[in-house]
Amino acid sequence: MLTETRPEPLRSRALGSGIAHGFFTRDGGVSDGIYRGLNVGLGSADDPESVAENRRRVAVSLGVEPAMLACPHQVHSPDVIAVDAPFSGKRPKADGIVTATPGLAIGVLTADCGPVLFCDAEARIVGAAHAGWKGALTGVLENTIAAMEALGARKEHIVAVLGPAISQASYEVGPEFVDRLLDAASDNDRWFVPSPRTGHAMFDLAGYILARLTAAGVTASSLDLCTYGDEERFFSYRRASHRGEADYGRQISAIALEFN
């Protein structure tokens, strides 16, 4: 009898015990072509049955029932929702999600943006945020922390871990992008270094995310992995765009409270 391939995600010891979590890679999935591996993007043009099977494997890897995996419809917003059950019907639009319900896995999808998993192991409350530059700039990280506090978490007990995201060396932005960040805060100039192209700059998304988390009062760390540069393990929207590919896969980062 053949045994099923189970995805083996990246994990962080910082998230503590009693917490099932994973920053999933492309490994362990059934998709083909440009989606090769564990593509979980419901919004991609991949075969829906392959996406469903990949998502089922993620749930199994986390130790939860396949129906107990909740991911919002991400729109690069600062919006965060609290959930105590999987979604029924249309997924709500949000970029952060929190729960205090054991056995319910919550997650976010990324393909260069920063996936951040949160937990207060003492209060037994977890969260996940999709932090691209827009979400991070407009407050999705701070709003996720606030939503956890509303469920009973304490900021000084919250740990946040940033998973694989595009690195500064691969993230070139135009002058209008730089202007927007500098208009928000003049000291945001520290997140840019010159680009080989005149008028452009290289943006440190990971550094910006970690600084926002630390300023918000939580303990933050990063896996320090680049999605763009590691094609074997990660999907990348920007890499696919540079190649002129029609679409791209998405990886998932998810977290769940284990039952006591």
Image (cartoon, helix red, strand yellow):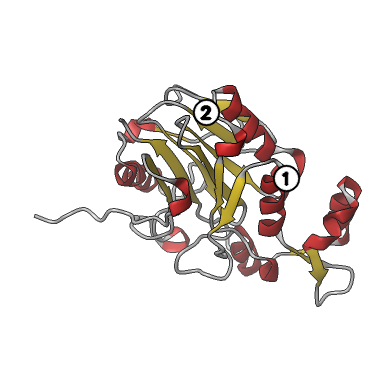
Q: Residue at x 45, y 58 (%)?
A: 35
Q: Nearer the viewer, residue 192 or 233?
A: 192
Q: Is residue 220 above or below residue 138?
A: below
Residue 52 pos. (x, y %):
37, 42
Q: Position of residue 203 (x, y in %)?
A: 75, 62
N-term mark: 2 or 1: 2
Q: Give the spatial CA distance, label 2 vs label 1.
A: 31 Å
User: Tag on residue 215?
Assistant: 1
Three-letter residue code for mark 2: Arg
Q: Nearer the viewer, residue 88 or 25?
A: 25
Left or right: 75, with 7 as reference point: right
Q: Secondary structure at mark 2?
A: loop
Q: Is residue 16 above or below residue 37?
A: above
Q: Which residue is mark 2?
A: 91
Q: Residue at x 85, y 60 (%)?
A: 189
Residue 8 falls in which quadrant of the image?
A: bottom left
Res 60 seen here: yes
Q: Amino acid at mark 1?
A: Ala
Badge 2 local density, few (<14 within 10 Å), some, or many (20+)?
few
